[in-house]
Image: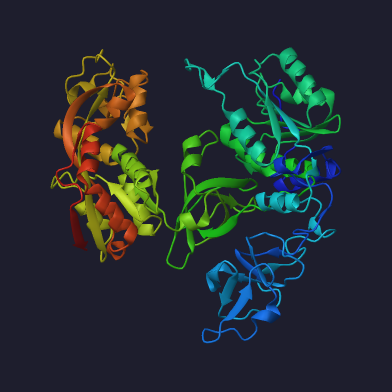
C-alpha cells in the first residue's frame, strides 16, 4: 500500500499549530550557582542583595584629603599637607577614612619628606571617590524575568551578592537516528551505506539554542526496535526527534509509531526542502520526525524545532538575520511550495546585494557549506525573474560578506589551495567559489553576479584560450585576463588500465563507457576538439551524454567503476587514485572587469598568486605549470 502524507500545510499554518499546541509548555526550573549561569534564562526578576561598593572607596591610587584644605593650591603657591592628619595614602578600592572627602591621584602629589605632601592644584569634594552603590544599589532590579544571562550579567550579580539564580532547566532532547543503511562517521562506507551525520548536525544547533541532547545509537529499520527506543525517549525527555522515516517509503515506520502513541499535528509542509516533516504531540510533549535528506533535516530544525527549544525556556526565538537581495537571472520554482534556496551573495558599492543560486538538492551538503545565505521564494510565485528581490536569511556575518570575492566558473584544484592561503595569511577577505563551468562563469560575470570568472575555453580555429569567447561575450567592455596556470588534461583511467586504453580513439570502442563534463565546460570543449581532430563523432562515444560537474566527480566515477574513462586535469588523479593518460596542455585564466583592477582584494589576490612559494605549492599538486602565473593582459573589447 502506498503511504501518503496526511496533510500538507503552509509554513505559517504549521508554525501556528505548533505554537498553539505547546503555548504553555515550559521546562522545570532549577537553582544554580551564578558563576555557572552564563547563557541560561532567568525565571523571575533578580534584585541586588547588597550595594556595591557599600562604603566610600578610592577610585584610584593617591592620597585621601580634606578638600577644603586644598583650596587655592597652585604651582606658584603649593599647599603642604601633614601625612596622617591632613592626608593619608590610599590605593584603588580602599575605604576613605571618615574625616576625608576627596582623593588626589598619586601623579599630582609631591612628597617633600616623611611627614609632608605638597600639592599644586586644589580638588572639589568627592573628587575620585566612588559613592556607596555606584555599581549596584541594594534592592535594585539587575535582571528581568526571561533574560538570557551574559558574562557581564554574572559579574554584576556576583558583585551585588547574588550567588545563586533560578533558571529554566535546559530542555532534554533525545534524537533517534534510524536506518539499515546508516553507519557512523568513524566507519568506512561500503556500497549502499551512508554516514549518519544528521544527528550531530541537529544536536549542535540544539545545544547552541540552550538544549541538552542525548543521541541514541543507530536503530535499524525494525518497528519493534524503533518503538522501544521511542517509548524510552518520550518518558525521559522534553522533546523527541526521530531521524528519519518521515517520508512514505516502505521502511518508514515513524508516522505509524507516533500515531499509535499520540496525536499527529501535521505530516508534510509546503516547503522545499523539508516537505516530509512530522510534528506530533505525545504525552503532552513535542515529537518530530525529520526527513533523512540532510538539508531537509537542517531546515526543518531551523524553522520549527528552534522555535520550541526557545519557548521551552520561556523566551521567543530571535528573528533570523535577514536582508533583501536581487537576482539577475531567472530562478524557477514550483508554485505552491515556499522554496529555501542556497545562494552566494555579492555586495556593490552601495551595499546592495545580488543573490546567486547554488546547486539545488536536499543532500547537497557542500552547497550549504559554500552558501552565504538562504533565499526564500514565496509559495505564490512561480520562481523569480531578473530584477526581482527576495529575502535572504544570512548564514555569515554581514560585514564579512561585503569583503568577499566571488569567483564563478570552471573547477580547478589550485583555487582551493589559494583560498586556503588567503585565510592562513589573514587577508581581510575570502575567495568564494562556485563551480559551474567556463561558459556559465563568463555568463555570470557578464550579468554582474560575480567578481571573477575562471575559464579555459579553447578556440578550435586559432588554438587560443578564452580571448575569442570574451570578444563575443563582452563587446565594448574592458576586461583583465589574469593567468592562473597552465595545466595538463588527459584521460582518467581505472587503476591498472584494465580496458587497455592507449589513445583517444580507443574511446570509440563499444565496450568503453565514457563520462563527460557538462555543456559549457572548458573540458567539454577540449574533448569535442580532440574528437574532431581524430575524426570521431560524439555518437560513437558510449556515455557522451552522461555529465559530471567537476574534475573530482569525473575521476571518482572512473575510480569506482561507473565509467571507464573521463577527461580531466592531472591534479585530480592524486585525490581519487586513478591512472592518467596525458593528451593536452591548456591555459586557465581568471577574468574580471577592468574597473575593479585597483580594488585592494584583487591586488591582494594578484600579489598572492605571484609569490614563488604559492607557485611551488600549485605545481606540487601535479599537472600544473606556473610559467605565466600572475601575468596580466588588459583587453579593450
- The colour scheme of the drawn protein is rainbow
Coordinates of residue 549 in the picture (x, y in percent): 37, 36
Report which quarter residue 487 is drawn in. top left
Coordinates of residue 222 in the picture (x, y in percent): 69, 13
Coordinates of residue 324 in the picture (x, y in percent): 56, 60
35 relative position to 447: left or right: right
Q: How many marks?
A: 0
Quarter occupied by the N terminus: top right
Tell me if I can see residue 528 in this picture. Answer: no
Which one is in front, 555 or 519? 555
Quarter occupied by the C terminus: bottom left
Q: Residue at x 61, y 64 (%)?
A: 60
Q: Is residue 218 above or below residue 622?
A: above
Q: Residue at x 69, y 70 (%)?
A: 85
Coordinates of residue 615 in the picture (x, y in percent): 21, 41
Tell me if I can see residue 56 in this picture. Answer: yes
Q: Residue at x 66, y 37 (%)?
A: 207
Q: Residue at x 66, y 16 (%)?
A: 221
Amino acid at each position: 500500500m502506498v503511504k501518503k502524507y496526511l496533510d500538507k500545510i503552509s509554513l505559517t499554518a504549521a508554525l501556528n499549530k505548533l505554537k498553539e499546541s505547546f503555548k504553555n509548555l515550559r521546562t522545570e526550573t532549577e537553582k544554580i550557582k551564578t558563576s555557572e549561569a552564563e547563557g541560561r534564562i532567568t525565571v523571575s526578576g533578580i534584585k541586588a542583595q547588597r550595594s556595591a561598593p557599600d562604603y566610600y572607596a578610592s577610585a584610584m591610587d593617591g592620597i585621601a584629603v580634606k578638600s577644603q584644605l586644598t583650596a587655592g593650591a597652585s604651582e606658584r603657591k603649593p599647599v603642604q599637607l601633614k601625612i596622617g592628619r591632613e592626608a593619608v595614602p590610599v590605593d584603588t578600592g580602599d575605604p576613605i577614612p571618615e574625616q576625608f572627602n576627596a582623593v588626589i591621584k598619586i601623579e599630582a602629589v609631591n612628597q617633600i619628606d616623611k611627614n609632608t605632601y605638597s600639592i599644586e592644584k586644589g580638588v572639589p569634594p568627592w573628587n575620585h571617590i566612588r559613592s556607596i552603590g555606584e555599581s549596584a544599589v541594594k534592592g535594585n532590579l539587575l535582571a528581568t524575568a526571561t533574560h538570557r544571562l551574559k558574562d557581564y550579567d554574572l559579574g554584576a550579580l556576583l558583585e551585588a551578592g547574588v550567588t545563586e539564580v533560578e533558571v529554566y532547566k535546559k530542555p532534554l532532547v533525545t534524537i533517534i537516528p534510524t536506518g539499515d543503511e546508516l553507519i557512523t562517521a568513524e566507519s568506512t562506507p561500503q556500497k549502499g551505506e551512508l554516514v549518519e551525520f544528521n544527528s550531530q548536525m541537529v544536536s549542535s544547533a540544539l545545544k547552541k539554542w540552550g538544549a541538552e541532547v542525548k543521541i541514541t545509537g543507530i536503530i535499524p529499520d525494525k518497528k519493534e526496535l524503533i518503538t522501544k527506543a521511542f517509548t524510552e525517549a518520550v518518558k525521559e525527555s522534553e522533546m523527541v526527534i526521530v531521524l528519519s522515516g518521515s517520508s512514505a517509503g516502505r521502511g518508514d515506520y515513524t508516522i505509524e509509531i507516533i500515531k499509535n502513541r499520540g496525536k499527529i499535528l501535521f505530516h508534510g509542509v509546503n516547503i522545499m526542502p523539508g516537505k516530509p516533516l512530522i510534528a506530533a504531540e505525545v504525552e503532552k510533549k513535542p515529537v518530530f520526525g525529520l526527513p533523512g535528506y540532510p538539508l531537509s533535516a537542517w531546515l526543518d530544525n531551523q524553522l520549527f524545532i528552534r522555535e520550541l527549544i526557545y519557548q521551552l525556556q520561556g523566551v521567543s526565538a530571535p528573528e533570523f538575520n535577514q536582508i533583501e537581495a536581487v537576482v539577475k537571472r531567472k530562478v524557477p520554482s514550483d508554485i505552491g511550495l515556499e522554496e529555501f534556496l542556497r545562494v552566494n551573495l555579492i555586495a556593490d558599492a552601495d551595499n546592495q546585494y545580488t543573490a546567486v543560486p547554488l546547486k539545488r538538492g536536499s543532500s547537497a551538503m557542500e552547497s550549504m557549506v559554500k552558501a552565504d545565505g538562504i533565499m526564500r521564494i514565496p509559495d505564490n510565485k512561480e520562481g523569480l525573474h531578473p530584477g526581482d528581490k527576495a529575502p535572504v536569511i544570512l548564514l555569515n556575518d554581514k560585514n564579512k560578506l561585503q569583503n568577499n570575492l566571488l569567483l564563478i566558473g570552471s573547477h580547478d584544484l589550485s583555487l582551493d589551495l589559494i583560498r586556503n592561503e588567503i585565510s592562513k595569511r589573514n587577508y581581510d577577505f575570502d575567495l568564494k567559489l562556485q563551480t559551474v563551468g567556463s561558459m556559465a562563469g563568463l555568463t555570470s560575470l557578464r550579468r554582474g553576479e560575480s567578481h571573477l570568472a575562471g575559464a579555459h575555453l579553447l578556440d578550435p580555429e586559432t588554438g587560443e584560450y578564452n580571448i575569442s569567447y570574451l570578444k563575443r561575450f563582452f563587446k565594448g567592455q574592458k576586461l583583465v585576463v589574469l593567468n592562473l596556470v597552465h595545466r595538463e588534461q588527459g584521460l582518467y583511467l581505472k587503476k591498472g588500465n584494465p580496458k587497455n586504453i592507449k589513445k583517444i580513439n580507443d574511446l570509440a570502442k563499444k565496450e568503453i563507457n565514457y563520462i563527460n563534463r557538462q555543456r559549457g565546460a572548458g573540458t567539454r570543449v577540449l574533448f569535442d576538439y580532440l574528437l574532431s581532430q581524430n575524426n570521431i563523432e560524439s555518437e560513437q562515444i558510449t556515455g557522451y551524454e552522461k555529465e559530471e560537474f567537476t574534475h573530482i566527480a569525473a575521476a571518482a566515477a572512473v575510480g569506482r567503476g561507473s565509467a571507464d574513462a573521463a577527461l580531466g586535469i592531472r591534479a585530480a588523479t592524486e585525490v581519487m587514485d586513478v591512472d592518467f593518460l596525458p593528451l593536452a596542455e591548456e591555459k586557465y585564466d581568471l577574468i574580471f572587469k577592468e574597473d575593479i583592477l585597483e580594488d585592494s582584494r584583487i591586488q591582494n589576490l594578484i600579489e598572492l598568486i605571484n609569490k614563488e612559494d604559492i607557485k611551488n605549492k600549485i605545481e606540487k599538486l601535479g599537472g600544473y605549470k606556473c610559467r605565466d602565473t600572475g601575468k596580466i593582459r588588459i583587453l579593450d573589447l
